Amino acid sequence: MQHRQFRQTEPLDKRLVEQAARLRKEAQGTHPGIARDNLVRQAQQLETAAQMQDWLSSPDLRNPR
């Protein structure tokens, strides 16, 4: 079985932020309720993941001792 390789053209943190923005926009068009809350929660999680990715890839990060 062959594995397909796909090279991402944009950095992970940028893709996460774009997807979070898309979810927030989708949440604005949704009626208040569980579905909207889930979309907002997913957007928040993606934004947090983008911040963590940015922090982990920063040149100032030191190795733990």
Image (cartoon, rainbow, N blue to C red):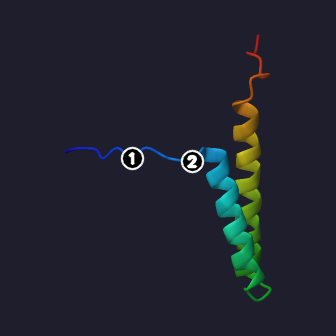
Residue identifier under label 1: 6
Q: Quadrant of residue 19?
A: bottom right
Q: Is residue 34 left or right of residue 4?
A: right
Tell me the amino acid under the disc marked 1. Phe
3D distance between C-alphas at marks 1 and 2: 12 Å
> Is 38 or 62 nearer to us in this picture?
62
Residue at 70 percent of width and 62 percent of height: 20
Q: Is residue 18 left or right of residue 32?
A: left
Residue at 74 percent of width and 71 percent of height: 24
> Is 39 or 13 nearer to us in this picture?
13
Q: Is residue 1 above or below residue 18?
A: above
Tell me the amino acid under the disc marked 2. Glu
Q: Count all numbered tags in the image, as a single digit.
A: 2
Residue identifier under label 2: 10
Q: At which x and y percent is residue 55?
A: 76, 34
What element does badge 2 sit on?
loop
Q: Quadrant of residue 37?
A: bottom right
Q: Quadrant of the N terminus?
A: top left
Q: For the residues carrying marks 1 and 2, which lies nearer the camera in this image?
A: 2
Residue at 71 percent of width and 47 percent of height: 50
